[in-house]
Amino acid sequence: MRGKRTVRAPLAIVVATAVTLAGSVVGTAVPATAAAAAVATTPVESDLAAKPWVSAAAGSGSATASRAIDGDLATAWVAKRQRAGEWLTLDLGGAYDNVRKVEVVFPDKGAVYQYVVDASSDGIRWTRVVDRTRAWVPGRGAVDLLTRPGTAYLRVTITRASPGAKIGVSELSAFNYLRDDLVLGADLSYADQNTARDGLTYHAGDSAQAVDLLSFAKNAGMEYVRLRVFNDPRDERTHEYLDPAYQGPERTAAVATSVKDKGMGLGIDLHYSDHWADPSKQAKPTAWTGLSFADLTAEVYDYTHDYLQTLVDQGATPDKVAVGNELINGFLWGSEKPQPWFGDPADWCYSCYFNNDPAFVAQPGGGLLWNYFGSSDPAERAAYDAAWDRFTTLQAAGIKAVRDVSAANGLHINLETHVIIDNGRLDRTLEFWNQFLTRLKAKGQDIDVIAHSYYPQWHGTAENYEANLHAVAAAHPGYQLEIAETSHPANDWDGVPVPNSPYPKTAQGQADAYQRVFQIANDLPDNRGVGVLVWEPVNWQEMVDWGNSSWPVLKVFPSVDVYRESDAEHVLQDTVYVATPVRRAPRLPAAVKVLTTADGSIAPVTVTWDAVPNRATSAPREFVVNGMTAFGPVTAVVDVVRHLAPAH
């Protein structure tokens, strides 16, 4: 993120220590309006049929197939051949391992529809997942539960319908849930500053249960911790070296051991700078400023190799390493990046040390020249290509160092490259990945994970970001994708959403925003979204409820529950469709089904229904009746019709 700085004076006092000790989203998210302290979190669920990359095809009447996934019950795919055996196929655009629920709604409310649903991974071989060929109860649809990893296609075939009933589908939905292997965690780099406030502890509800933050983070459900590394940490403004050297190699290595001791995943984010490296600034570490390009390349390899070997030797082998941070503009900027980088004295980093010392640009580095992107001028194009070559040469050196350490120790450490997709600049990010991956492979290296930050104020709405992420994934199918940084404030107390976001600055808004981001990663086709990391959840737009804390025990907003409560342990058959004649009480089912995700078992569960409203069936209409089960609420959609259609 840009300018990773504290935003309020009270927070700055404990910025280091705060991290030291360390509802439901269905389709389009709905803004939360709950008070800051009242948070409702339920498992993330999304209808894949609403995704822009999902399409529908039909055996006949294909021109109307898209109406079955337009979110409008008033429209429908209608088969051109009105006969049994007509089918509609949903192409999910890739395979999914956690599609657990399918909903089919038909055009005629009082008719009987008999049908099957088949699933496929390749569109050729099919497996029956729903069989309603013996259904005789009139109703315009049904919800069914399933377990089938690798589902890429769903096909509804209507095997029989009441005489005169329209053969077609109004809506076909496929509901996706968070995978167990989607890793949810946080950047907790400030964990090395625990000497500032010895004994600082955290709790969610009961101060008697307060623990150090790494224990708290694990108990809260965080599975993974990312730690940044500065070469020789110094203050950007004062230019002074830090003592202690917070987030330097030694202190970060000590925290890395603690993370591994907790049994959590570990990511190492090498900045190759003495302080923040992000899209607006990528300064060489001071010790490297005078190096020729060849020596700089060698230093990147040696530094990376030695540090990774140190971590391995102390039993803190990282699961993943990022060679640089937010590299959309390159890194280790040198003579190709003219000064001043912050040319306006009003800019917050105008006086940063690297902006005032000409040594930083005395030799070439790895800065990219986006001003020449798309230029037809031969000289500009040559400079553009040369910058790319330097950047990928430096990157290849760092990546090779990680691969060499891995091979020498019989390990596999994933390599990640982390950039951004600025709002309205997808073209630049697509160009980045095309240039980067092509040139990196030409140099004999490659990465495992494509990573991006997501901050709505800079990177656009969630819908825009999801479309951009999908575009990157589609362009480069051989890579996993991670949302390496995201954040949303919980305690600015004005309740107003951040730019490009519907979510207010409350704990509920924070929880909803994070669940939406979890959903985006999880819904990438072919299960390629591998994780989401919240940026500094106690230091930046934090989860700490400062107003209700008793120092030194800090109370955490219940939005932290998103880590544990976003996974679905059970999936409920939460909607039933019932048709009844005028002036006749509807027959509501005594039980619905529930699926246990751990083993895929499906069992009945009793429903307690609210009373049917008086005179609800006195004339044709639609109304709902709410019910409750041991696993959550159920809704009965009741259609009152003049006559039920005969079954045959």
Image (cartoon, rainbow, N blue to C red):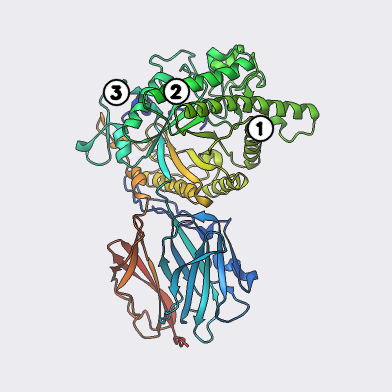
Rendering quarter of residue 492: top left
> Toward the viewer: 627 or 343?
627
Neighbourhood count class around disc 2 (C-alpha, 10 Å): few under 14, some 14–19, many 20 upward: many
Q: Can you give x and y, in whole percent of width and height, for residue 142 in the image?
A: 43, 71
- Report helix, strand or loop for mark 2: helix
Q: Are marks 1 and 2 in contact (CB under 8 Å)?
A: no
User: Can residue 191 be seen from the camera position used here?
Assistant: no
Relative to 169, residue 97 above or below: above
Sequence order check: which comes first, mark 3 or mark 2? 3
Q: Is residue 421 left or right of residue 633?
A: right
- Report helix, strand or loop for mark 1: helix
Q: Amino acid at mark 2?
A: Gln
Sequence order check: which comes first, mark 1 or mark 3? 3
Q: Can you give x and y, in whole percent of width and height, for residue 192 in the image?
A: 36, 24
Question: Which residue bears the numbered disc 2?
Answer: 309
Q: CA distance from mark 3 to mark 2?
A: 31 Å
Q: CA distance from mark 1 to mark 3?
A: 49 Å
Relative to 419, residue 31 above or below: below
Question: Which residue bears the numbered disc 1?
Answer: 442
Q: Can you give x and y, in whole percent of width and height, for residue 368 in the image?
A: 65, 28
Q: Which mark is residue 197?
A: 3
